[in-house]
Amino acid sequence: MNTSFTKLTAAHIGKDMRLEWRSRDVFNSMLFFSILVVVIFSFAFEPTAEESRRMVGGLFWVAFLFSTMVALNQSWARELRNGVLDAYRVSPAAQEALFFGKCIGNFVFVAILECLMAPLFVLFYNLSSVGAAWQLVLILLLGTWALVINGTFFAAMSIRTRNRELMLPLLLLPVSIPAVTGMVSATTAVLTGESSPMTHIKLLAAYCVVFTAASFALFEMVLNAE
Amino acid sequence: MNSKLFRSLVALVFVLLAYGTYMAMEPGPGRVTESSSKVRPSSSPVTLEVVSTSEFTPGETAIIDTPESGVQEKQAISAVPDATHVVVSKLDNQHDGSIQAFPVADKVPFSKQLTSPAPTEASMGDAQRIFYYHVPAATAAYILFFINFVASILFVIKRNETADIWALVSAEVGLVFATVVLITGPIWGRFAWNTWWAWEPRLTTFLILWLLYVSYLVLRRSAEAASGAILAAALAIFAFLDVPFSYVANRFRGHHPPPITLVDPGMKFVFMVNMLAFLLFAGLILWYRREIEGVARAIAAAHIERAHRGVVACIALPAMFFFQERQNLNPTHFMLGAYIAAWVVYIVYLALITAKVSRLKKEAAELGM
């Protein structure tokens, strides 16, 4: 990785952050969407503290899976206006930098969202963790990266199809099922303290490594698909 | 493609399928016998209780099998004292739970194997016969998905159209076989486990695989032809990478059902016949579909394939309600239900691609080809 790659990535991240800071379109809709999910789920199930420990891992990740999709669709749609994406394709700059920048940007958005939403989950579901809570941070980082890396890749793929926004969930959800299973099982294991989450954390780590490698290897091909 | 050769191949495959089906579904000689006695290892002769001794001959071999613990051994039959007892020369292992003793002739003449259908399995009855077309369909689906992966890799490297055609047709035909697996599996499960579905690693992985290839075909439908091929190749690689993860992620969920052990040589033979027949059948459909795709691309006609898999599921799923009553589960009904559902899927698919052929012929005629 030479300096120009790092600089390019930083430039992409900076641009996305600035755009988002000025409009706050994506972030606000993601935040509101996940608040709605939390509220609706808590109306639908009315769990007690004991039950909610078992359920909340699933609810938490489902809420983020869907709100990540809101962000992902927007992140590439922005580049389509004024033919920005085509300009990237003809420019000599490394195209992986664009992808990496998008991934980091999306990761930051989703991570901030999770930090804001976690207290809300604790509040609504009377949560307290039986297992070691620091492990949740690790699960959060790995799980978010697993969602974002595949999500950014498949969002880039789906904007090249006819029915753009519709395609993203259809492509992303089947591939993400193992990662979601891992995140949910690990979170539930920590919250209930019944089993060790380490196997699931290792699985998530391996998933992140494999799919990060695959996304980087295939991104240029997908971007230039014509 | 030489049409005469093709026709004789088709005839051969269908004859083999009919023969395999007869061998799988016709109740063979009831050679599987069961007893609930517990026996300990012994170096002196042991007497086993069986339902009937008609097939046991002194001097030949018996297989003593305990399905619960998977303990299995072969021993020589030393005597057959009466109609319900068999004496074997010794026992090496301890057998707890139900014992199944199978007579095995040391040399079964091939002609006899050819004409004796599969014996009825002791605990599951006819429902076990679903196995003879469920497992070959699963094997075919796995092979076809693997072809799809290899073809996608080749396409990524070489970008030639042949690889792309193979990737597309193998995914589509593989999905048809996977659909059969997912329909016949629950019908068997309802009888054997008393539940349609268990969130167990193998089932879950297969379901995820099915979803992945549905999304693969949806992507092919919704992208433009040229870019679709590239995007689909990338997705195929992702799908393949996903399989080990989905297996590991679900490793801790649910109980694993005891695998069916085919100890009886008659069962093994019928299974091999069906495996061969269904793999050839899959190969034939793949070939046929490939020819169609070749023609379709040659006349550069834009095709939107019908989302027929959804239609098939809608036809097959209501059939489940015929099996809902809890008492008196009849294994034969399950066998027939699964068999009919499997062939509904195959025939609907064949009808759809045949309809595509006639559509293409019409188009080709209009273009004066």
Image (tube, coloured by chain):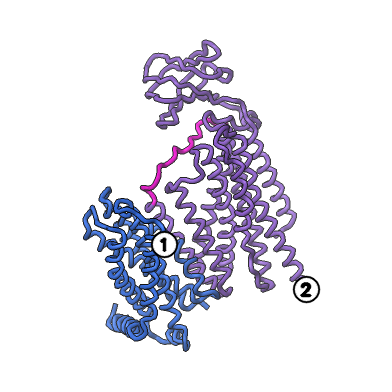
> Dividing the image into 4 quarters, which one contains the N terminus of chain A?
bottom left
Label 1 Cα neighbours within 10 Å, binned few <14 / some 14-19 / many ≥20:
many
Instruction: Find numbered disc 2 in the image and state the secondary structure of the residue it sits on.
Output: helix
For this rendering, which residue is in front, B359 or B253?
B253
Residue A176 disc label: 1
Q: Give the residue type that dot 2 points to.
A: Glu
**Overall secondary structure of the magenta section:** loop
The residue depicted at 30 percent of the width and 82 percent of the height is A10
Chain letter, disc 2 residue: B
| Residue designated by label 2 | B366
Picture coordinates of residue B241, whole percent (x, y)? 42, 60
Q: Quadrant of residue B243?
A: bottom left
Picture coordinates of residue B98, whole percent (x, y)? 45, 25
Numbered-mark total = 2
Q: Quadrant of residue A186?
A: bottom left
Which chain appears blue? A
The residue depicted at 37 percent of the width and 17 percent of the height is B42
The magenta segment is B250-266
Q: Are marks 1 and 2 on the same chain?
A: no
- Marks 2 and 1: in contact by CB < 8 Å? no
Q: Colour of chain B?
A: purple
